[in-house]
Image (spheres, helix red, strand yellow):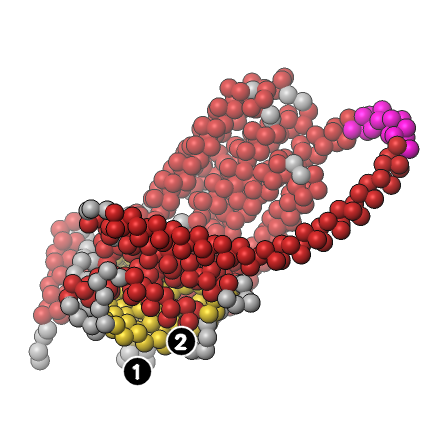
Amino acid sequence: MIITKTLLSKRLIAVLVFLTLSTFQTDLLAQKVTEIDTERFNIAVRKEYRQFFEDTHGVLDINDVWGVDSLFDQGATGTKSTRAFYWVRVSLLNTTPYDLKVMATGPRTVNSQLFKKNPNGSIYRGVFGSFVAQKDLKPGDSRTHTAFTLRAGVKEDIYFKVHGRAFTGSFTDALSFQQARDKDLLQNYLFFGACFILILYSLIQYLVYRKRMFLYLTLFALGNAMYAFAVRGFFVDWFMPDLPEEGLNFTLVWAQLGHLGGLLLAINFLELKQKFPKWHKVFVALVLLMIFRTSYGVYLTAVHQDYGGMTNMGLYTLLIDIVIFKVMLFALWKKVNASQKVFLIGLVLFGFALIMALITWKFNFITNFRLVLLYTASIASLSQVIIFSIALGIRMRQHEVDKNIALDKLNTTLKEQNRKIESEVIDRTKEISAQKLMLEERNERIETLFREVHHRVKNNLQLISSLLNMQQEWSSTEDPAKAIEDSRSRVVAMSMIHQFLYRTDDIATIDFKEYTEELVNKLDAIQVERVPYKLRLDFKDNPAFDIDTSISLGLILNELVTNSYKHAVLDQRDLKLDVSLKDLGEGMYSLAYQDNGEAIQQPFAEVVKKGFGLRMASRLARQLQGRLEYKYQQGNLFTITFANEEARMALSE
């Protein structure tokens, strides 16, 4: 039998892991078997398993650890590293007379894999974890569980390869799991339904009264509701299913968005800037602290995957806000009106809720402390919406009383003015009729001038191009001349858009195939040193794009064609250009540009950073909700993925 170097290396690493762990733990534990003798069960993995070892280098696979008891008999207790790889083995024995469907859950895992042997000897693999993309999950599985079948009367070893924080989980029968999941979903839907009603209520109040305080109240309710929505996993599942790691970074952002709404609401409602300028400066400092908290929290999660550190940092820095809320209650109590007193009480109660959340998170004295933490903060936040709404209602009611008094005083004056108004209405009606005729005439002139505007834009751009030509001839240095030549080509690309609009009846879209062909011809014509070129276009049908999309794509093509010309001149070769466009569906397109030049020697990311043209092209691609990619494939191949105007509007909503 031939042993490969890779397999030998993995076996050697396994032996080193064994020797390292045995140095710290000499009391070896025998493998334990957990028996399942009923259809309904819930076995906590963290209490049952005692077989564990850390894969320091993260290179071992299931074939390296399967059946190697010496690796698991170390009695290690776990790791706290957020980037560690470690293996867990649990032995289960189904003593019932029939096969059982088992749900393995891991609510705290980052990226885990479950392995067990199938009856035919193959190895079953299931993935779950917070960082697992939806497309990588098996049908029926989720980021918190994976399902497998446990055969009757057979002891089976279950292996977990865990990447990230300490693993906790359980084995649950399918029926109990589904019932618990349905109950949890019902609670969530009821909770988020209440959130939606309060957000809608705040928004309607803003639309009715047009008071910024209601807008800040809406922001407060929205941020805290979306925080709960993100913590429970719905935000990632609904909006970023295949980018879970990036989606989790929004968790703190939503919470701080709600907190920002609360701070702005306090500044506005308590009239701090006008009546209490010192307290206004304090709250501006709290807003800056919130910005720091958000930025540093996203840094901890996005770079270090330290979600525990992010939560600790957020809760501890919120203590500053809580203390200030309490001090302000006593400092301003006698200086504010009834509605503002209610608001101050709401701020202090919100602070007490945050303290409760901090104690629950830090000391874990409640069994299901994560659920308590979520709903303590979230329900408290929504309660604050109600309290703040009461305060706003008191103020609006007082405003209503004051308004009625003023209206009574004005009533007599209004009656006297009615007679004058009636005569003025007649006069104004005549004026409006005359203005209507003037507007109709003006509209006709606007329609006539509309084409003239495009004509003038074209002439202006041609004038700019001519001025740049003169500047290029005048310049005595190479770099300014090159800059002017590049700018001139960009102006040509833009002016052609207006030329197309002017010569067609459709002022909204551009025939992109015809535009691409003419753009390459124009760029060839303005080159100082020209080379023979051959252009091949592969466009299905006649794609037409809006003006913004066409200008951005034209500028990108301008940079690529100009770059190809430069290298073709330097290499003294004929230039071959292939441009193709594919419709990817749902408003997305892929524009491929390929020349026959030599490959870019430096990494493409560095070239983009150093070169103004490619950097501008990359940014334009991102503005189109796409990206610019490069690879060498018998020539330099640039691929621009982008969205049309309708798709971009949908993505930005």
Q: Is residue 148 above or below residue 308?
A: below
| Mark 2 crowdedness (10 Å alpha carbons): few <14, some 14-19, many ≥20 | some
The amino acid at mark 1 is Asn
| Mark 1 crowdedness (10 Å alpha carbons): few <14, some 14-19, many ≥20 | few
What's the distance in space between the residues labelled 2 and 1, CA to CA?
51 Å
Label of residue 539 in the image = 2
Task: Pinpoint residue 425: horizontal percent, then vertical percent.
Answer: 85, 39
| Secondary structure mostly seen in the magenta stretch | helix
Q: Of the two numbered discs 2 and 1 on the same chain, state the one appearing first in sequence.
A: 1
- Residue at image position (53%, 33%) is 263
Image quadrant assignment for residue 365: top left
Q: Which residues are magenta?
A: 403-419
- Label 2: which secondary element: strand
- Residue at image position (25%, 51%) is 473
Q: Which residue is mark 1?
A: 120
Q: Nearer the viewer, residue 298 or 94?
A: 298
- Counting the numbered discs, the total is 2
- Residue at image position (15%, 66%) is 571
Q: Nearer the viewer, residue 310 or 516?
A: 516
Task: Pinpoint residue 216: horizontal percent, then vertical percent.
Answer: 58, 38
Horizontal side of 430 relative to 627 (left or right) equals: right
Q: Which corner quadrant holds the N terminus?
A: bottom left
